[in-house]
Image (spheres, rainbow, N blue to C red):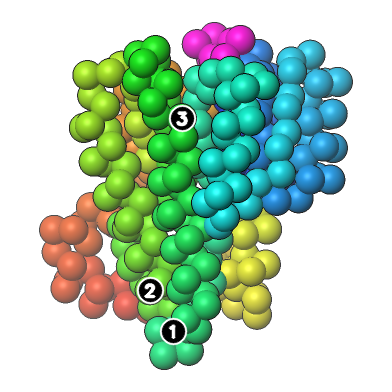
Amino acid sequence: MNTRIQGCFVAITGASSGIGEKIAIECAKQGAHLILLARREERLAQLAEKIKNDYGVSSHYYPLDVQNLDSIQHVFTTIQKEIGQIDVLVNNAGFGIFNNVQDATMDEMKNMFEVNVYGLVACTKMVLPAMIERKKGHIINIASQAGKISTPKSSLYSATKHAVLGFTNSLRMEVKNSNIYVTSVNPGPIKTDFFTIADKQGNYVKNVERWMLDPNKVARKIVHSMFTPKREINLPGWMNAGSTIYQVMPRLFERMAGKAFLKK
């Protein structure tokens, strides 16, 4: 039980499905009030209703496409007027497409950076001034092990997640004296609908399915970390150990893990 978030307002982007939906439900279990953000309004409405009925907390929802920076400004300004403070922001919205650089389109590159990086930064900027003024807040950015270990066919996706990690680490230092926590979440593959876009042929899922993470367990770890000075959440542990070795001995690691890198 995380009593630290009881009565707090938690905003989650990409909340209509997958890990975002699981985080929202877990927060509601702990007594937090939800602000659900995603493109699919009907799914948001259903989730908000479920949360209010099952857990007795308030659950607000706003349609938001984080690829649209003007929409981000409008929605967060509306939230500030209608609800007030956001205590925790979970930047979860994101997507990937597994493709070789040669085959990737410029639109794929543009869209991934606009959603995974620019949208994340813009949402953060919308909540940061009030958090600094109150000297209270927590920003949680969902990155990926792909931001630590680059693999073939994920060059553009990995680049966006490297950017998220760089941004998160710098932000943590910038707000160190403002009592604001900043956490990056670096999971390996999770059993969600992420792969319906990323892995359209299903080859990657078929190869790694037995190692895929349970989204409910991932959500619980994320919610348990709220309002704690947790720097990173790395899952699974063995994959994070691999990323540590990769940083120290990249050439040896690439040689030893070459076949695993080609699972896509």
Q: Earlier in the sequence, mark 3 or mark 1?
A: 1
- Identify the element where label 1 is drawn: loop
Q: Secondary structure at mark 2?
A: helix
Q: Position of residue 209 (x, y in %)?
A: 60, 62
Q: CA distance from mark 2 to mark 1?
A: 7 Å
Dot 2 and dot 1 residues touching (CB under 8 Å): yes
Q: Earlier in the sequence, mark 2 or mark 1?
A: 1
Bounds of the magenta span? Answer: 1-9
Query: Which amino acid type corresponds to the residue marked 1 in the rendered image?
Result: Asn
Could you classify mark 2 by the number of other residues whose Cα lies within 10 Å: few (under 14), some (14-19), or many (20 or more)?
many
Q: State left or right for residue 136 relative to residue 80.
A: left
Q: How dense is the environment of label 1, judged by Cα within 10 Å: few (below 14), some, or many (20 and up)?
A: few
Which amino acid type is shown beneath numbered disc 3?
A: Val
Task: Find out whether residue 2 is within the magenta segment.
Answer: yes
Q: Residue 127 got which mark?
A: 3
Q: In the image shown, does 170 or 240 lie closer to the viewer? A: 170
Of 102 and 218, the residue lying toward us: 102
The residue identified by callout 2 is: 155
Q: Please tell me the numbered disc located at residue 100.
A: 1
Residue 99 picture location, percent across and down: 49, 80
| Residue 224 pos. (x, y %) | 50, 23
Q: Which quarter of the figure is the N terminus placed in?
A: top right
Residue at 58% x, 18% y is 84
Mark 2 or mark 3: which comes first in sequence?
3
Q: Residue at x 60, y 77 (%)?
A: 203
Q: Is residue 172 left or right of residue 223?
A: left
Disc 2 residue type? Answer: Ser
Choose top left, top right, bottom left or bottom right for residue 30: top right
Answer yes or no: do the residues labelled 3 and 1 have beta carbons within 8 Å?
no
Residue 254 against residue 246 in the figure, above or below = below
Can you name the residue that lies furthest to the bottom here? 102
Name the foreground residue: 51 vs 241: 51
